Amino acid sequence: MVRYVLLVIIAGIVGGIIARRKGRSPIWWSILCAIVPLLIIVIALLPPLVSEGYTKKCPYCAEIIKEDAMFCKHCGREQPIEMVRVQNKK
Ligand SMILES: [Zn+2]
């Protein structure tokens, strides 16, 4: 019984982490993975979504990469640096 509870907790955490990395709802997926641990495989195979603040789309190969990535992991090209915002000081 204790083992089953542990399995459920671990499945939930792992599912949530994978979901977050893929730009999907971590809460929703951790609950689903806790109920059906096999869903971890499903979420691991699902393509990542573009989520604001965590992932972005590579302008060269259109693959989803991490927001902070300097280089695309798919095509290896350097990501364009966003314009540095200059604050107007009076
Ligand atoms: Zn790329």
Image (spheres, rainbow, N blue to C red):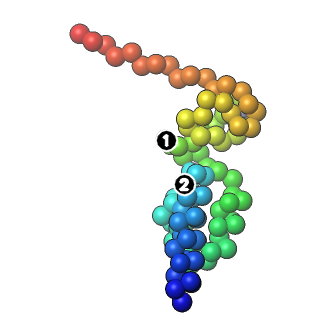
From the viewer's perspective, is 72 left or right of 29?
right
Residue 25 is labelled as none
Q: Quadrant of residue 18?
A: bottom right
Q: Residue at x 53, y 78 (%)?
A: 6
Q: Nearer the viewer, residue 46 or 34?
A: 34
Q: Relative to 32, does residue 18 appear above or below in the rendering? A: above
| Tag 1 secondary structure | loop
Residue corresponding to mark 1: 53
What secondary structure is found at the residue carrying circle 2?
A: helix
User: Spatial distance from mark 2 to mark 1, Cα to Cα?
Assistant: 11 Å
Q: Quadrant of the N terminus?
A: bottom right
Say whether disc 2 or disc 1 marks the residue closer to the N-terminus.
2
Q: Is residue 44 above or below residue 50?
A: below
From the top left corner, tell me how far across and down residue 61 is, in percent.
74, 34
Q: Which amino acid, mark 1? A: Gly
Q: Residue at x 58, y 64 (%)?
A: 14
